[in-house]
Amino acid sequence: MDLHLKNRSVIVTGASSNIGRAIALGFATEGAKVVIADIDESGAAKVAELAVKMGASDAVAIRTDVTDPSSVSAMVQKVQSTFGGIDVLVNNAGWTVDRLFMEKPREEWEREVQINLWGNINCTRAVLDGMVAAKRGAIVNIGSDAGRIGEFREAVYGACKAGVISLSKSLSRELGRYGIRINTVCPGTTMPDTQEEAGAQSLWTTTEMAQWNTAEMRERIAKAYPLRRVGRPDDIVGAVMFIASDAASFITGQTISVSGGYSMV
């Protein structure tokens, strides 16, 4: 299927690592103009360079702190001046550390809310004026099965992702009249295979999370999934690109899990 994404302007937040990196490179193979928006400036530059090699019409790295509205606005303005508009926004930036709710320090809760929920709100608001004026646009929010069914050791993270799902549905009702579609893709556990995929500032590089990304732990985690394996970043790409494309022009306000059957809500 030709998704007709060539020369489409696509912003992917948190695209220097893991799922975001795979999504950005997926759009690159379709010939899109890809924006790597990430707080890790050097990592973003590496992904932008690779995106061009993989077929992107153009690719730029822009340092972006999704928790800072001024940083987000500056990024969006730069994209609009460089590419003339924004066709697709993928709100992918996210962060958590698996820890029991009562054992988490407040600063971790606050960072989870700032990145996973406020980051989504900030980026969505920043692109809407341009999309409303153009009377078209697609926003794909990366949620989580933790936001659909709740998850052990991910209470606040799951609450944020549930908020993202609800935000997507509510905004779909508000903005559909302008031709703007908003949908959510919910991964299950998705682990990078290499350090290059993980990126320098990925949550998978933290001591707490790295202990889960071992062969033994992968085997144990896989038993909870009907397809009996842990997700890879590439597993999420197809769903995101399809929903962002005109092939999904009559799909909005929907939540799709790409999680090997972990959630069947």
Image (tube, rainbow, N blue to C red):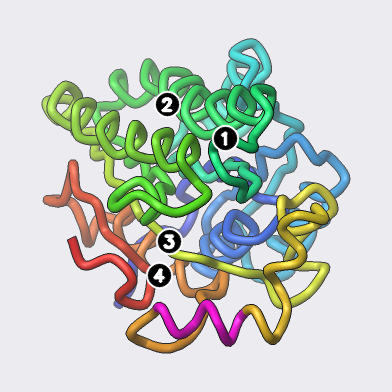
Task: Give residue 179's position: percent from left, percent from top.
Answer: 19, 33
Left or right position of 107 against 155: right
| Residue where numbered disc 4 is placed | 238
Nearest to N terminus: mark 2 or mark 3: 2
Kind of residue sitting beneath label 2: Thr
Instruction: For marks 2 and 3, give the CA distance.
Output: 20 Å
Q: Earlier in the sequence, mark 4 or mark 2?
A: 2
Residue for point 59% across, 16% down: 73
Mark closer to the chain start, 3 or 4: 3
> Is 16 colored magenta in this rendering?
no
* Residue nearer the viewer, 114 or 56: 114
Q: Label 1 crowding class (10 Å Cα cut-off): few <14, some 14-19, many 20+?
A: few
SS at mark 4 in the image: helix
Of the pair 152 and 262, the residue shown nearer to us: 152
**Distance of mark 3 from mark 1, alpha carbons?**
25 Å
Q: Residues within 10 Å of mark 2 (few under 14, many from 20)?
A: many
Count all numbered tags in the image, as a single digit. 4
Whether residue 12 sits left or right of residue 107 in the image: it is left
Inspect the image, locate mark 3, and give the three-letter code of the amino acid beneath it: Pro
Residue on which the image places disc 1:
102
- Above or below, 172 against 207 in this view is above
Amino acid at dot 1:
Met
**Which quadrant does the N terminus fall into?**
bottom left
Real-space CA distance between mark 4 and mark 1, rounded to the nearest whole angstrom: 37 Å
Amino acid type, callout 4 = Gly
Real-space Cα separation, disc 2 to disc 1, in angstroms: 32 Å
Q: Quadrant of residue 28?
A: bottom right
What residue is drawn where x is 64% and y is 58%?
Answer: 21
Q: CA distance from mark 4 to mark 2?
A: 22 Å
Report the residue at 30% width, 18% height from top.
Answer: 133
For mark 3, what is the residue? 187
